[in-house]
Image (cartoon, coloured by chain):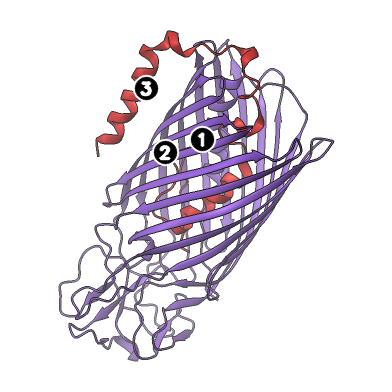
Amino acid sequence: MQLKNKNKKAISIALAAATSSLLANAAVGEENDVGWEIDTSVLYYGEQDDRVEDTSLALRIARRFEDGRAFVAGLSTDSLTGASPTGAVPLNEPQTFTRPSARGQYVTQPGEIPLDDSFKDSRVAGYVSWTQPFGENWTANVGASFSTEYDYEHLGFNASLARDFNNKNTTVAAGFAYAQDELDPEGGAPMPLSEMRGVGDTSNKLSGTQDKSVTDLLIGVTQILNERMLLQVNYSFSQSDDYHNDPFKFLTVLASSGAPVVGPDGLYSYRFESRPDERTKHSLFTKLKTYIGGGALDTSYRFMTDDWGINSHTLDMRYRFNISERNYIEPHLRFYQQSEADFYQANLIAGDTVPNEASADYRLAEFTGTTFGVKVGHKFNNGNEASARLEWYNQDGTAKLAGVPGGANVFPELDAVIFQVSYRFHL
Amino acid sequence: MRKPFYLFFLTASTMFTGGCALDGVQAWERQDLAKREMSIINEPLEAATDDHIYFSKEASSGGQSFGGGGCGCN
């Protein structure tokens, strides 16, 4: 059974609870101790055509003491199943693929997008953070995070410092995070650009585990603009080193006629992807929160650019409209657009020089992602709160076959449903 | 590549040079700002969920808080 990884966002969760809360809460002076606040949620994420499904349970406990000290911890579990596009292109004939473990094979029917249907994993992630004010205007935060699954381990820590200015109307924060990830896929990670082999042939597999380290730096300013408006501007830098490949993604090698080419062990020819061994990202993030019409309007924009040649724009808007004192409805719209990575290509051509770097992972292609959703919430007499949201996420993009007649677009369009129920209570 | 830096420092420096104009909202005038839905991340579990999903499905992550490491293989 092949087991794959989802993401390791624990560090990001911890920092969301760290840097951002430093920025936000210091600015508004919200320092009442209301006891332990417990957040719980159940999430269902499902893609069309039996692609990826995730059921996730999450718990977050937090306490903000009157002197500004705060403790936050969280734990989440994911149960993932389904199938994920491999990067191989649809053909007019059946295709046989060897599973990444080299212990079995699966067949994709003519005209269908090759999906590895053996994806199954469970994941546990956790984080903890402590916030400590000192002096009149300073706040420090330290945190740690972990996640673990069958073939992937993540460990991270972070620290940040914030200072208030201008009668606590301005907060400046700077943070640092470091993470170490370790990947150990069953059967070994494939050698970059090696050809897929038959069952039991592990001659193209690397030995040992594959590591990646990530260093993040963030500096941000939160400014109260007026009695109903708050602005945050962040710059962040991220540097990651070593293993960046997805060991389960590969490229189809086509003849210039567009026909498949025979490879080793009776399979068609597929080569495992090869990404650069480092990546540098810069992001500029701005968020404006406005209290208008009896509700909170949350608007954010992020520009991201990296040395893989990817530029992206993300616009997110949600408006919490209070229908009554106890009930609210919150529509949500998110728009995302990215350019393709320099080394992205939908396929390889037989006889051409094999490039040093190549990936047909559609997530490195040019595409647009759109999210529509709505959330409803209810506050109980005792201050507890229940909410549910239903969202629809679509991806459509461009992944044109190169070097063959027609140049068909083989981008695997995605439709997904996100359904989350949350409950917050106090102890 | 340089544009984000430029924009950030322009914004930041504008804020500080205009410091006097930025301290006008007193603590007792913040009843709307103090509402939970007006905090920068008012629903942390939901925000973490979204980060989780979009990190797995897109080539960008982070920005508001730190982007995490990880495979994001699906």
Q: Is residue A353 left or right of residue A152?
A: left
In the rendering, what colour is chain B? Answer: red
**Mark 3 neighbour class, 10 Å CA radius: few under 14, some 14 to 19, many 20 or more:** some
> A205 and A394: which one is in front?
A394
Q: Quadrant of the C terminus of chain A?
A: top right
Please tell me whether mark 1 sits on a helix, a strand or a loop.
strand
> A392 and A198: which one is in front?
A392
Q: Amino acid at mark 2?
A: Asp
As drawn, the label of residue A6 is none
What is the distance, in whole Å, between disc 2 and disc 3 at their CAs? 20 Å
- Is residue A127 at least partly visible in the picture? no
Please tell me whether mark 2 sits on a helix, a strand or a loop.
strand
Q: Nearer the viewer, mark 2 or mark 3?
A: 3
Q: Does residue A317 lie above or below A148 as drawn?
A: above
Rendering coords of residue A66 (x, y %): 72, 19
Q: Which chain is purple?
A: A
Chain label for disc 3: B
- Is residue A77 at least partly visible in the picture? yes
Rendering coords of residue B12 (x, y %): 37, 22
Q: Quadrant of the N terminus of chain A?
A: bottom right
Picture residue at 55% right of the left edge, 13% below the top? B25
Q: Amino acid at mark 3?
A: Ala
> A343 and B20: which one is in front?
B20
Picture residue at 43% right of the left edge, 47% below the top? B61
Mark 2–mark 1 contact, CB under 8 Å?
yes
Which residue is labeled 2 in the image? A216
Q: Does residue A32 lie above or below A380 as drawn?
A: above
Picture residue at 39% right of the left edge, 18% below the top? B15
As drawn, the label of residue A158 is 1
Which residue is labeled 3 in the image? B12
